[in-house]
Amino acid sequence: MGGLFTALNAGKTSLEVNQKSIEIIGNNISNVNTEGYSRQSAVLTPYPSMSFGSFFIGQGVKVSDVTRDHDTFVTNQLQEKSIEYGLQSGQSNPLAELERIFNISDNNLATDIDNFFDSWKVLSANPSGLVERDIVIQRGEQLADSFHTITNDLNKVQQNINDSIISKVDDVNSKITEIADLNTRIFNIEIQGQTANSARDRRDMLAKDLASSLGVQTYTDSKGMMAVQLPGGLPLVQGTEPMTIEAVPNGQELSLVLHTGGVTRNIGLNNLGGELYGLVNIRDTVIPGLNDNLDQLAYNISTAVNSFHTTGAGLDDSTGLNFFTPNSAPPLATDPLWLDAARNISVALTNSNQVAAAQAPVPPATVAPGDNRNALIIADLGETSLINGSDTFDSYFGKMVSKVGIMSNQNKLSLGGAEDAMVQLQNLRDGMAGVSLDEEMISLIQFQRGFESSAKFLSTIDEMMASLMDLKR
């Protein structure tokens, strides 16, 4: 009877193992569309054999562990490529907005510059005409308005970036906290000899998301806990302790700070990566550079026009007057003279008789009605290389438009390349660790037949035991 009872126990373990394997396959099938899920499989281990005379007999089988298909190299590659994808994705929308502001249509700033200097050419043909003088002032005001519009649009892009950063910080903090919680859960499960497969899958996916958002770097310690840190080395998760990122507004400015261990640290570009790096880089580097170029353009136009307008004379014999209001002195000696020139530019004249189309006469002479010499000089400024000695006003603005266009096109190419790399790596990962319904169906049939065989084996043992019992009767 002892041998039959041993066989009965072996059949029981086989039945349990096949049933558990079928449950695992069912879990794989149900998670076939779950993002980040890794295929799980049972690890089967035989029970120690029992000595039976001069040989050993097996005691059945057990499920010693449930493992997940996982490749660390592919996971790390996905995380690395997520950083590049996040960076290009973060820059995509702001660059599209900048491309809209610095467009190449017929109604851009270059058109207003041309219209302004063309109005001086028209005035030179009839220097005493009040209508032509009014048009010069109107074209100047239109040019100033265009500078103001672009400046305001750039500020709006910066504000939109700040709003995006604020919205993303909350999501980042929730993922940081969840990774710390998962560290605790994984440690508590695996210290008992089990494997926290689902928790590890979720943690890997969160790490990839944080790499895309912040460019984080991760490593796993000997306790199975994931440490997360910013590109510059500042910690985000240490063991079971999560840190917190805060977006701190200061007027129109917005800065990021990290609260870690009771200490607050500023997070600059050197400590950022991924999407937030792209956003902050556009906000703090690209847009200020464009603003500076725009200020230089406005400053050079206003100073060049004023330098000749002050030496000319209007119909009312007025002289020494600025056409544009001079830019105010910068607050610091180290600031450029053109600081905020695009924001501050405006037409100083209110009376069209003061438009200095003529050269100032020698007192006590009066302005000749047909004197157009100053108007011709100012009209020619539009075609003169006055910026850096090599650029006209139009060509300088054209370089700004070209710069934005090149950045936007490069971003589209880089984003497409990053997307392709992500798709390829994701396909590689799915091929190695993802769920294949075909494979699961084959495994399901295998363990189904194993379960049926185990049941048949138990039925056979039952009949044998019944036969022995009949011998006793």
Image: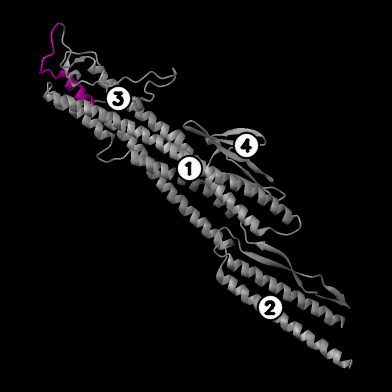
**Does dot 2 land on a helix, a strand or a loop?**
helix
Q: Is residue 383 something that shows in the picture?
A: no
- Name the disc covering residue 346, or none: 3
Front position among marks 1 and 2: 1
Q: Which span of residues is magenta-colored?
A: 364-381
The amino acid pointed to by label 3 is Ser
The amino acid pointed to by label 4 is His
Q: Which residue is mark 2?
A: 450
Q: CA distance from mark 1 to mark 3?
A: 33 Å
- The residue located at (32%, 27%) in the rendering is 297
The amino acid pointed to by label 2 is Gly
Q: Earlier in the sequence, mark 1 or mark 2?
A: 1
Q: CA distance from mark 3 to mark 2?
A: 88 Å
The amino acid pointed to by label 1 is Ser
* Figure check: 76 above or below 472: above
Tag 1: Cα neighbours inside 10 Å, few (<14), some, or many (≥20)?
A: some
Q: Tell me if label 1 and label 4 are in contact, CB under 8 Å.
A: no
Q: Measuring from the top left, give residue 322's x and y in whole percent.
A: 26, 18
- Name the disc covering residue 164, or none: 1
